[in-house]
Amino acid sequence: MGQEAKLALSGHVLMENRNGLCLDISISQADGRAERREALRMLKRQRESGFSPATLGADRGYDAADFVRDVYVEGVVPHVARKRRHFSVDARLARQVGYLHSHRCRKKVEEILGWMKTVGGLRKTRYRGVARTQLCAYFTGAAYNLLRMSLLIWSAA
């Protein structure tokens, strides 16, 4: 009792930009490089299932030369926010309208993560291990998508 919490797991979400739906969610050991590794894994899983995204939006933490190169290898254009110095994204790409739109939409992923933490109960998980927490995250992501789709249908009517 009275000790600090130690970060052991991290959650990652792949979101569809148009409607803000959660396409994939991944739980991994928090080690400092898990974000980029899991983003590539989720991207590969989507491509294997038949979905081929054209772009991948991400924040500045993903602006690393090896990640940008690997995303290009997957046949996807990386819309990664550029660091102030030593950025990996080409300046021509950063001037395109789609790049700017992608950066406005990528903030919606924070809504997914916030909902999963507050409503879905993933702020402090009650499960031990990556596999059990991953299963809980899948259920939470499915619940979020059902709620989001009902709101989209309600707003369209």
Image (cartoon, helix red, strand yellow):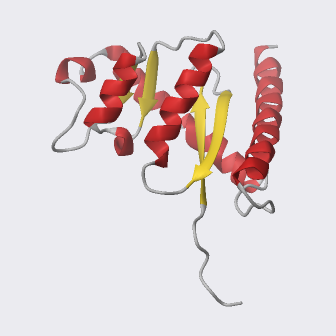
Is residue 12 visible in the rendered structure shown here? yes
The residue lying furthest to the bottom in this view is: 2
The percent coordinates of residue 112 (x first, y second) are 65, 40
Give the quadrant of the N terminus. bottom right
The percent coordinates of residue 125 (x first, y second) are 75, 60
Location of residue 42 by image quarter: top right
Q: Is residue 114 left or right of residue 56?
A: right
Q: Nearer the viewer, residue 119 or 52?
A: 52
Position of residue 20 relative to residue 132, above or below, is: above
Is residue 16 visible in the rendered structure shown here? no
Q: How many marks?
A: 0
Position of residue 130 relative to residue 36, above or below, is: below
Which residue is located at x 48 percent, y 44 percent? 35
Q: Is residue 64 left or right of residue 59?
A: left
The percent coordinates of residue 138 (x first, y second) are 77, 38
Which residue is located at x 39 percent, y 24 percent? 71
Which residue is located at x 43 percent, y 55 percent? 32
The percent coordinates of residue 48 (x first, y second) are 61, 15
Give the quadrant of the C terminus. top right
